[in-house]
Image (spheres, rainbow, N blue to C red):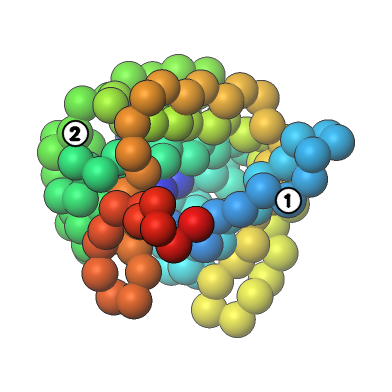
Amino acid sequence: MTVVSSFSASGPAGATASAVCSLSLDPMMMLVCLDLGSRTLAAVKLAGRFGINVLGLDQREAAEVFASKAGQDEKWQSVRWRRHLDVAVIEGCPAHIVCDLQEVIGGGDHVILTGNVLEVEAQPGEPLVYHGGLFRALDPDEQ
């Protein structure tokens, strides 16, 4: 589970996103999908940059808060974060990726954002997975 983030004149913006994947290895690119009505989408378009915060197993509450219609202030007060390369990075995530926005492509009630990877940082930790309507850990027996 991830939180896609950006930074606008009014502060950090973020939304939970499960549709996130690698798009290209050369150049390194990512793809994320956001709802057309997302306040985070507006911030990403304005900033021209987005972050992908890969949430850890112990960050389920953050996934739920960022998936809600709560205001951005409430969302960001629920986590420790820092501004880095003009995106909001959630502290304690196993990984974060910073991308320059390349394209915004329509896709039904969502848009597809593509971005060139500027930075990838990873640290030890197990990612939070959302599958079959449940939050869970990766099961090593299923790999």
> Which residue: 79% across, 39% down?
25
Question: Which numbered tag is attached to residue 23?
Answer: 1
Residue 105 in the image: x percent, y percent? 71, 64
Count of numbered circles in the view:
2
For residue 80, above or below residue 72: above
Residue 68 lies in quadrant: bottom left
Q: Is residue 121 in view? A: yes
- Residue 112 is left or right of residue 124, and the answer is right
- Are the residues tagged 1 and 2 within 8 Å (C-beta)? no
Query: Of the residues tagged 1 and 2, which is closer to the observer?
Result: 1
Q: Residue furthest front?
A: 141
Badge 2: residue crowd in 10 Å (few <14, some 14–19, many ≥20): some
Disc 1 crowd rating (10 Å Cα; few below 14, some 14-19, many 20+) is: some
Which of the two labelled residues, at mark 1 and mark 2, occupies the earlier sequence position?
1
Q: Which residue is mark 2?
A: 79
User: Residue 37, percent across and down?
Assistant: 43, 68
Judged from the image, the secondary structure of the residue bearing numbered disc 1 is strand
- Amino acid carrying label 1: it is Leu
Residue at x-position 28% and y-position 26%: 92
Percent coordinates x, y for residue 39 in the rendering: 39, 55
Query: x and y percent of residue 32 in the render?
Result: 58, 55
In the rendered image of this protein, does residue 139 appear above or below residue 101? below
Q: Residue at x 33, y 39 (%)?
A: 126
Point 62% across, 34% down: residue: 99
Quadrant of residue 93 in the image?
Answer: top left
Quadrant in which residue 73 is drawn = top left
Tell me the distance, in whole angstroms, between the alpha carbons under discs 1 and 2: 28 Å
